[in-house]
Image (cartoon, rainbow, N blue to C red):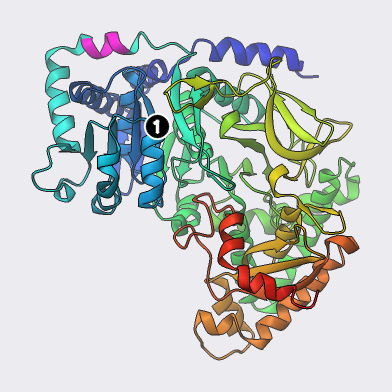
Amino acid sequence: MGPSLAALEAQCQSQASKLTLPLLLKRNAEEYAGAPALTAGDKTLTWAQLREQTAALARGLGALGLRRGERMLIMMSSRPEHWIIDFAAVHLGAIPCTAYQTLSTEQVGYVARHSGATVAVLEGAEEVARWRPVLETLPALKRLIVLDASAIPAGDTRFVSFAEVEAGGRGLHQGEPAVFEDAWRTIRPEDPIAMMYTSGTTGDPKGVVLSHRNAFYEAVAVDIAVPIPMQSPSIAYLPLAHIAERELGFYRALYKALHMHICTDPAGVVPLMAKVSPPAFFGVPRVWEKLAAGLRARLGTLEPSQREPILAAHAVAVEVFRLEGAGRTVPPELMQKAAEVEARVLKPLRRTLGLDALQWASSGSAPIPVDILEYLGGFGLKVLEVWGMSETTGCATISTPADFRLGAVGRPIPGVQLRLASDDEIFVRGPVVFLGYLAADGQIVSAVDADGWLATGDIGTLDADGFLTITDRKKELLITSSGKNIAPSRIEGMLRAHPLVAQAITIGDRRPYVTALISLDPDAAPLWAKAHGLASRSFAELTRDPAIRAELESLVASTNARLSRAEQIKRFEVVPEAWSPATGQLTPTLKLKRRVILEQYAGRIDALYADA
């Protein structure tokens, strides 16, 4: 029998109460000085080099006037400079905040004004172009640092190049190294480490302020649940404005001295996995859905003699996965059969994909269809769900290969407590709950009640074994005109399980029945069309193609067979566009912007109810 939950919590508290970002960076620079910390393309920084550059940038930021408690906004892709400037601000006691690069000028203005940022760090010309129109509305903003010096507007002294700040800071640090060392030693675990802006699916984004203790308690707790070796390889591919990447790519990486491989193109994630073989990988549902679609397509190209042994092995692995996912015992004869096909078929297949070293594959940020989990599980890929949010510093619940339930998002990490309100809203309490939201006056305002409970806005259930299942977002529940409560994300997940479907939204609030809008996958749709003998045509033509319409009608019928009468989709329409953050229907984390979609397609939606 392992340690009790109380003992695990005490272990997490004991470690996290001593840790800060500067302390861990110093440890890594001393104990793993020559070991790789960050790799981007063919360039690698060691831990010693990372700290040295952090020190130079910290002195440079200080010379620009960045002070303790002030906010610094970063609008930059995932690249080594992003790590360095963020870490540099933290060493000064300032609060870094990464803004999504997809923000419009209007959104930039809101975030910059709300944060009261005194310094902004921009990547290049595109970011500068979005910031310039709102600069006169930002009285708190003193300086803008631009990585690409050629993008700096001529004659505007508010702008300065990244290289100039770094060079000036390096000279200061070489002359007085004690200034940097003295500054970071004043940082305490309870101090802010970063601010994250929520994705704003239902309103204006909120500034979520996290502490060092939040960040490193999460890192310690996750490592206890799913340990990985020190200095393991890992992949950073999500925006650093996303809590998952910030926690895993920054804070867990520091805690475990990981070698982070930065992937700037999401399409390159799977090839990079094959190259570096990480032991752990977090993917938003779309990543796993794409992987499943790719595997299906790959199998479709094989000769029957090659495909049939894989499908037979897959069927055995799915059976085992379902039993394990239901908490049931796997019969010995089935376990033996599974071990045989694992060794003979599945592990060699995963090796060709670079996934054979993967010990913990996780999914979060949005619901993932169980069909996708089972399909991947049939290849020996146990993709397990976690649940949390920016306000809980990432995952508050976790599933592990030895402890999971299909359809559930795991059990609380050590030290985290859950309870359900009368309407089944999930409340959470524990060391990962954030410091509070940033108010307009710059104060950090706690969001917990008198007993320390945070209302999450998610609706869920808890089973007798403590496994949490998420039903939907409280604000997203549909209530039909007949008073039926409908959870849209479950229905949408069933539709997205089909390779043709990139996104789907269900409609029905104050309506007589449920309808749906479907956005095709711009990559998968042409492949599907080719495989089914359709002549080459444009994406817009595919959205109107009768064969694709028939396939989606079949999908809706099979989905309806798994739903109650009130939940069933009565009508649907395929929209002519592919939805994305750039076109405005999705957040940067690929969540539906429901309000935007309902407004944009109001006419089409009304037509679905024309005869109601």
Residue, disc 1: 115
Give the structural element (helix, strand or loop) at label 1: helix
What x and y, as percent, mark residue 431? 62, 19
Q: Main secondary structure of the magenta part?
A: helix
**On the picture, is 488 further left or further right than 350?**
right
284 is higher (above) or lower (below) than 229: below
| Residue in the foreground of this view, choosing between 54 and 199 | 199
Point out the residue furthest to the left here: 155
Q: Is residue 400 shown to the viewer in this render?
A: no
Q: Quadrant of residue 484?
A: bottom right
Q: Residue at x 26, y 53 (%)?
A: 129
**Residue density around tag 1, few if under 14, some if 14–19, many if 20 or more, within 10 Å:** many
456 is higher (above) or lower (below) than 436: below
| Residue in the foreground of this view, choosing between 461 and 306 | 461
Q: Quadrant of the N terminus?
A: top right
What x and y, as percent, mark residue 243? 52, 37
Q: Residue at x 54, y 11 (%)?
A: 17
380 is higher (above) or lower (below) than 197: below
Q: Is residue 302 shown to the viewer in this render?
A: yes
Residue type at mark 1: give it.
Answer: Ser
**On the picture, is 506 further left or further right than 323?**
left
What x and y, as percent, mark residue 440? 44, 28
Q: Which residue is drawn at 37% across and 21% down?
A: 25
| Residue in the foreground of this view, choosing between 335 and 521 | 521
Q: In which quarter of the image is the C terminus?
A: bottom right
Q: Give the range drawn in magenta.
A: 179-183
What x and y, as percent, mark residue 105? 35, 51
Q: How many labels does the image show?
A: 1
| Residue in the foreground of this view, choosing between 6 and 117 | 117
Specify whether residue 286 is painted magenta: no
**On the picture, is 26 further left or further right than 189?**
left
